[in-house]
Structure formats: structure tokens, C-alpha cells
Image (tube, rainbow, N blue to C red):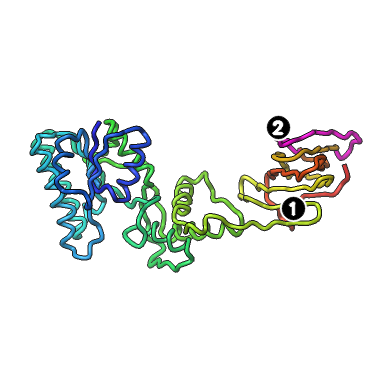
């Protein structure tokens, strides 16, 4: 299948083209402002499917709305007609096409041109009136509040939220791309006269800003956003794509003493805490038990013994652990326990606890195994 994508350098098109290539669509005609205009003839002659994603939404001169959203659509249709090509055409329009402003009027005019083309040639035309789209590779300080917020907050720059209560309807770029590829395969989501991306996130602008600020702070408090929340998960991924290249890494607080170190890695309010414990050779750590707090130990380097004793018993249970054979050891409640490094190198243990440490309620009681 030969696929023509207009606006190939744009946000949606870049993501779409990348995923099409991932799925082994090899013949993609990428057309943008920088493309030799003569190539449009070749592309329109051979295309089996058109994604018309070119458009103008933030011009310096409002007359550019007509040039970018109407005139080029007319040129595209005329070129397809010149070669009697009635292949399907998908156009990315906007929910503003129903609004009486210069941008909305131009998008509506582009839609009407394609609808007339469909009526005259019987070509299949699918119109996607998209709300705000967010995700990686969207240009900040342009027409996306999410992109601007992510870019600025990641760099500790101020943002402006005129009205935090404004409700935003957003679609995520991966969901948009998935829907466009469904349309390519004849499985578009059609609702009335228009197509739509099924997953829409509705959230006040102020909450979006607050979430992004919390992502920045999460590096300090070692928390991870609620990944069960679909919007937060997608927004967090988006935020990370805007990090300055020199800020991909961040330091953790290592609690170091003669025995080794203990470092908190990740904390979540509902899934507990992950830490990294390093023990020097011959060192034993632990000798305590918990009422409700439970843990999982995974030795990833070195050799050791994890010992248990039920607090009302004299029987000691031993588990030999090694980075040579990864296995998880559960630490049940009501058992005092310790871990000893019996090797001649540092022993590294990944430790998970079902709750993160609360100094006011540690639920940790010293008792020798």
C-alpha cells in the first residue's frame, strides 16, 4: 500500500509515520512545506490512501488560514482528480470547525471541499474533528498548553494559567495514531458524519498544571504518579519527553555507614516502596519484625543468607540467596528476620515494602533472630 501523508513534518504526522514504519508500511510519501511541489503529482498519481494532516493553526497573518487549510486542500483534490485517483482520504480537522472564528471557518471550508470531492467521485472521505492533542514531539509555546506546560515546568520556567477551571478535552497522540491506522484498515470510529478518537480525557486546565508540577516534584520525593489513571500515565510519559537532555538523570539520597548503604528508589501511596540495600562482606542487617508491613527481598549481586524466626518460636529458618540465581524471598509478618552477606564482595538487594516508611508509625520492632 502506498500512503501519502501531507504535513509530514507536523506533530501528528511525525508520530503516524513513525508508527506506520514500525508496522512495516514501507511505501510512505511524506509531503511537507519543504517538499518539491512537483512531487505532489507523482504522489497523488500513485497513492492508495491519503492522510491529509497539513494545516495552519497559528499564523502571523490570519489570511494564512485560507492558504494552509483551504487552498492546499483544493490543490490536493485537484491533483488527485487529475489522475482520476479516488483513493480514501482522511483529513485531520478540528472541533473548532463548528465555531465562527477564522481558524474554524478555514477548517470547515477544507472539510466541505473534501465532502464535495466524495460526492462527485464517490471517494471515501473521513473527517476527524480532533480536540486538543497531546504527546511527544508537540511544539511548545505554539498551540498546545500541555506541550508548553511540560516544556516550561521541566525547565523551572513560569507558566501562565489564566483560568484554572477551564475544562479541556484532550486526546493522546498514541490513541490518535491507533485510530488513524484503524481508518487505514477500514475500521474507523464513525459517529454521525464525523470520525473520532474513542478515548477522550476531560480535565480542568488547573489540574493539568498541578499534575505536571507533581511530576517534577516526584524526583525529590521519589514518588511515581498513579499509573492506573490513564490520563496521568499518558501525561507523565509526555512530560518526560520534554526533559532537557542534561536532566535525564537525578540523584538519590544514599544512607551510608560502615555496613554499606540503603537508598530509597521509588515510593507510591498504593503500591509501596522500592529500595536498594548494599551490604559489605560479613555484615548482617535487619533483626526486626513487623505487624503489618511486609517485604520482598531480591538479591541481584553477591551471596547471602536470609534468616527467619517466628517471634514465639526458637526455630530459625534459613534461605541462601545469590545474584547467580535470582529469586524473590517474601518476608512474612510476625517473623523477625535478618540478611547476612556471606560472600567476599558487596551484596546488592532490591527490597520492596508494601508501604513506605513513616517515622511516626514505623511498624518495625527490634528482635534478634
Mark 1 residue crowding within 10 angstroms, few (<14) / some (14–19) / many (20+) = some
The one of 125 and 285 positioned closer to us in this rendering? 285
Q: Position of residue 301 (x, y in %)?
A: 71, 40
Q: Position of residue 309 (x, y in %)?
A: 85, 37
Q: Is residue 246 above or below residue 337?
A: below
Whichever of labels 1 and 2 marks the residue nearer the N terminus, that label is 1
Q: Is residue 309 left or right of residue 81?
A: right
Mark 2 residue crowding within 10 angstroms, few (<14) / some (14–19) / many (20+) = few
Q: Mark 1 sits on what residue? A: 261
Residue 333 picture quarter: top right
Residue 325 is marked as: 2
Residue in view at x 21 percent, y 55 percent: 104
Q: Is residue 367 above or below residue 106?
A: above
User: Is residue 314 covered in magenta?
Assistant: yes
User: Is residue 269 covered in magenta?
Assistant: no
Q: Position of residue 61 (x, y in %)?
A: 19, 65
Q: Secondary structure at mark 1?
A: strand
In the picture as drawn, the residue positioned furthest to the right comes out as 314
Residue in view at x 44 percent, y 61 percent: 206
Residue in view at x 66 percent, y 48 percent: 273
Q: Which residues are magenta?
A: 310-331
Q: Secondary structure at mark 2?
A: loop
Image quarter hosting the N terminus: top left
Q: Is residue 167 above or below residue 116?
A: below
Q: CA distance from mark 1 to mark 2?
A: 23 Å
Q: Position of residue 276 (x, y in %)?
A: 69, 48
Residue 212 visible here: yes
Amino acid at each position: 500500500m502506498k500512503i501519502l501523508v501531507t504535513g509530514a513534518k507536523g506533530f501528528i504526522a511525525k508520530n503516524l509515520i513513525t508508527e506506520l514504519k514500525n508496522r512495516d508500511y514501507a511505501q510512505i510519501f511524506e509531503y511537507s512545506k519543504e517538499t518539491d511541489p512537483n512531487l505532489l503529482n507523482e504522489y497523488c498519481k500513485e497513492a492508495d490512501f491519503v492522510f491529509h494532516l497539513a494545516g495552519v493553526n497559528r499564523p502571523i497573518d490570519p489570511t494564512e488560514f485560507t492558504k494552509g487549510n483551504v487552498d492546499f486542500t483544493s490543490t490536493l483534490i485537484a491533483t488527485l482528480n487529475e489522475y482520476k485517483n479516488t483513493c480514501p482520504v482522511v483529513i485531520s480537522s478540528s472541533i473548532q470547525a463548528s465555531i465562527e472564528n477564522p481558524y474554524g471557518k478555514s477548517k470547515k471550508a477544507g472539510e466541505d471541499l473534501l465532502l464535495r470531492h466524495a460526492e462527485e467521485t464517490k471517494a471515501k472521505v473521513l473527517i476527524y474533528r480532533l480536540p486538543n492533542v497531546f504527546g511527544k514531539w508537540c511544539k511548545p509555546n505554539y498551540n498546545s498548553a500541555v506541550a508548553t506546560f511540560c516544556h516550561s515546568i521541566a525547565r523551572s520556567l513560569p507558566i501562565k494559567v489564566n483560568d484554572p477551571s477551564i475544562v479541556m478535552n484532550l486526546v493522546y497522540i498514541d490513541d490518535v495514531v491507533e485510530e488513524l491506522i484503524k481508518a487505514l484498515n477500514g475500521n474507523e470510529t464513525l459517529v454521525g458524519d464525523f470520525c473520532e478518537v474513542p478515548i477522550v480525557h476531560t480535565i480542568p486546565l488547573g489540574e493539568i498544571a498541578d499534575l505536571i508540577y507533581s511530576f517534577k516534584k516526584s524526583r525529590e520525593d521519589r514518588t511515581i504518579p498513579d499509573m492506573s489513571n490513564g490520563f496521568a500515565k499518558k501525561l507523565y510519559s509526555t512530560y518526560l519527553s520534554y526533559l532537557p537532555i542534561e536532566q535525564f538523570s537525578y540523584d538519590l539520597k544514599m544512607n551510608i555507614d560502615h555496613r554499606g548503604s540503603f537508598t530509597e528508589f521509588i515510593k507510591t501511596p498504593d503500591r509501596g516502596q522500592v529500595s536498594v540495600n548494599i551490604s559489605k562482606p560479613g555484615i548482617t542487617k535487619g533483626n526486626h519484625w513487623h505487624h503489618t508491613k511486609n517485604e520482598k527481598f531480591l538479591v541481584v549481586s553477591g551471596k547471602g543468607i536470609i534468616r527467619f524466626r517466628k517471634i514465639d518460636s526458637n526455630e530459625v529458618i534459613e534461605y541462601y540467596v545469590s545474584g547467580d540465581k535470582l529469586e524473590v524471598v517474601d518476608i512474612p509478618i510476625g517473623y523477625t528476620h535478618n540478611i547476612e552477606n556471606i560472600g567476599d564482595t558487596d551484596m546488592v538487594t532490591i527490597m520492596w515494602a508494601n508501604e513506605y516508611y513513616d517515622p511516626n508509625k514505623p511498624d518495625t520492632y527490634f528482635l534478634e533472630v
